Amino acid sequence: MPAIYASAPGKIIIFGEHAVVYGRPAIAIPVTQVNAKAVITPNPLSPPGKIRVVAPDIALMADLDQLPAGHPLATSIRCVLASLKISRPPSLTLRVTSTIPLAAGLGSGAAVSVAIIRALSAFLGHPFPDDQVSELSFQVEKIHHGTPSGIDNSVITYGKPVFFARGKPIEFLEVTHPFMLVIGDTGVRSPTVEVVADVRQRWLTESNLMERLFDAAGAVALEGRQAVEGGDYPLLGQLMNRNHAILQEMNVSSLDLDRLVEASLVAGAVGAKLSGGGRGGNMIALVTPESSAKVIDAIQANGAVRTIVTTVGPRN
C-alpha cells in the first residue's frame, strides 16, 4: 500500500473573535501560504494495531498507546478509529509536519487535526466527507481551546471564506473583488485557552458589559460581510479598526499587538486589528498593492518576527 497524505491550510479571523463563542457571527478565511501535512505509511513488518506517531515540530516520536487520552494528535487518530469501529488497524506510521506557527491564531491545531483525519480515513479506505472531518476536528479543538466556537475547523476543512455563527449552517462568502492582507506575527505565543477562559470569567462577572461588546462585534461582522462581498475597501478598513477597539475593551489585546496595529496604520494600511485569541499571536492589516511593502517594513521594524501576505478573492 502506498503512502497517503493530506494537507490543510491555516486560517485567520477577520471579524468576530471571542464574540463568536457567544453566538455572534464571525468571518474567517483560509491562509494557504501555510499548511499542516499528515503522511501515513504502512509498516507491514509490525503487528496489526501498532501506530507510530512522529511530529518533529514538537519533538514527538511515540506509539499511539504511549500517548495520553487528552493528547490532540492521539485524539485525532482515536476519533477516526472509533468512527470506523476499527480496534486493530493495519500497522502504520503517521508523520505530521506544519509550517503554521504554533499558538499564533492561525489555526495550527485545527489544521493538524483536519490533515490527520483526512489522511487516516483515506488510508483505512473510507475517506470522510468534509462535514465529518469538520465535526471530528471540532472534538479535538475542545482540547486546544476549552469552549471553541467551531469556526477554525470549519474554515480550515472547507478551505473557503466563511460567515459563521455557532449552531447555524455555514455560509460561504462570495468574494468577487480581491483584497490583500498582511499578517504580522508578534512572536508571542497566544495562550488561547487561557484567554477564552478569562473572557468567560469576565462575562460571568460583568455580563452587561461583555454582552454589549459581543453585540458590537457581531454588528461589525454583519456589516463586514457586506464590505467583503461588495468589495468596499474603505468600509472594510474602518470595520477592522472598530473591531480592534472592541477587542481592546474586552482586554484581549496587548502592547505588542497594539504597536503593530498602530505602525501598520501609520504606514498606510486601510485598517488593522488583532486576529485570533489575542494577547500575542497575529494581527492583520488591510493593504493595497501600493502600500503593502511599507506596511510590511513598518511592522517588522516594530517587532514582528514574520509576515505573510495573503490575497482574499476568487482564487481562495
Image (tube, rainbow, N blue to C red):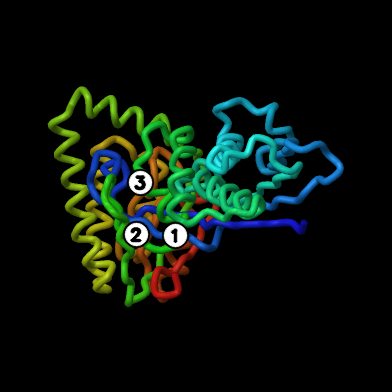
Amino acid on which the number 3 mark rests in the picture: Asp
Locate residue 86 relative to residue 219 in the image: left or right: right
Gap between marks 2 and 1 measured at Cα: 9 Å
Q: Residue furthest right?
A: 45
Task: Work out whether 156 lies above or below 173.
Answer: above
Q: Earlier in the sequence, mark 3 or mark 2?
A: 2
Q: Residue furthest top?
A: 205
Structural crowding at the residue carrying mark 2, measured as other residues with C-alpha within 10 Å and reported as few (<14), some (14–19) or many (≥20): many
Mark 2 vs mark 1, foreground winner is 1
Structural crowding at the residue carrying mark 1, measured as other residues with C-alpha within 10 Å and reported as few (<14), some (14–19) or many (≥20): some
Gap between marks 3 and 2 measured at Cα: 26 Å
Which residue carries the number 3 mark? 258
Q: Position of residue 228 (x, y in %)?
A: 28, 67
Which residue carries the number 1 mark? 158
The residue under the point 34% across, 42% down is 149
Secondary structure under the numbered disc 1 in the rendered image: helix
Which residue carries the number 2 mark? 162
Amino acid on which the number 2 mark rests in the picture: Val
Quarter of the picture containing the N terminus is bottom right
The answer to whether mark 2 and mark 1 are in CB contact below 8 A is yes
